[in-house]
Image (spheres, helix red, strand yellow):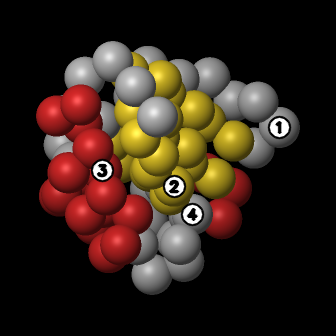
Amino acid sequence: MVIITLQRDKCIGCNYCAEFAPDYFRMSKKDGKSVLLKTEDKKGFYTLKTPNYEAFDPCEKAAKACPVKIISVKEI
């Protein structure tokens, strides 16, 4: 299981996450901030749990590239 979390409120709209992991992240046309696909807001955190282990590498690259460090990726 791979768990990806985005703290969207702190996003600065750099677009790295959407470049490194386009299957999981998009940039919002409304406010220019990152959107973690197929998730809902829970007190400012968006979390995706997926059994797809292929999600780990691109999302880990996105997390490392994020200048404000608002993406976390765990493998359990």
Q: Name the residue under label 4.
A: 70
Residue 75 found in image quarter: top left
| Residue count near mark 3 (Cα–Cα under 10 Å), binned few <14, some 14–19, many ≥20 | many
User: Does residue 64 sit above or below 54 in this rendering?
Assistant: below
Q: Is mark 4 on a helix, strand or loop?
A: loop
> What residue appears at the point 25 percent right and 22 percent down from the top-left corner?
52
Q: What is the C-alpha distance between the residues marked 2 and 4?
A: 7 Å
Q: Name the residue under label 1.
A: 43
Q: Is mark 2 on a helix, strand or loop?
A: strand
> What residue appears at the point 83 percent right and 37 percent down from the top-left corner?
43
Q: Name the residue under label 3.
A: 59
Sequence-first disc among 4 and 3: 3
Q: Nearer the viewer, mark 2 or mark 4?
A: 2
Amino acid under disc 1:
Lys
User: Does residue 70 sit above or below 69 in this rendering?
Assistant: above
Q: Name the residue under label 2.
A: 72
Q: What is the C-alpha distance between the residues marked 4 and 3?
A: 12 Å
Q: Is mark 3 on a helix, strand or loop?
A: helix
Q: Which of 60 and 37 is in front in this view?
A: 60
Check whether the beta carbons of the residues at disc 1 and disc 2 lie within 8 A of each other. Answer: no
Sequence-first disc among 3 and 2: 3
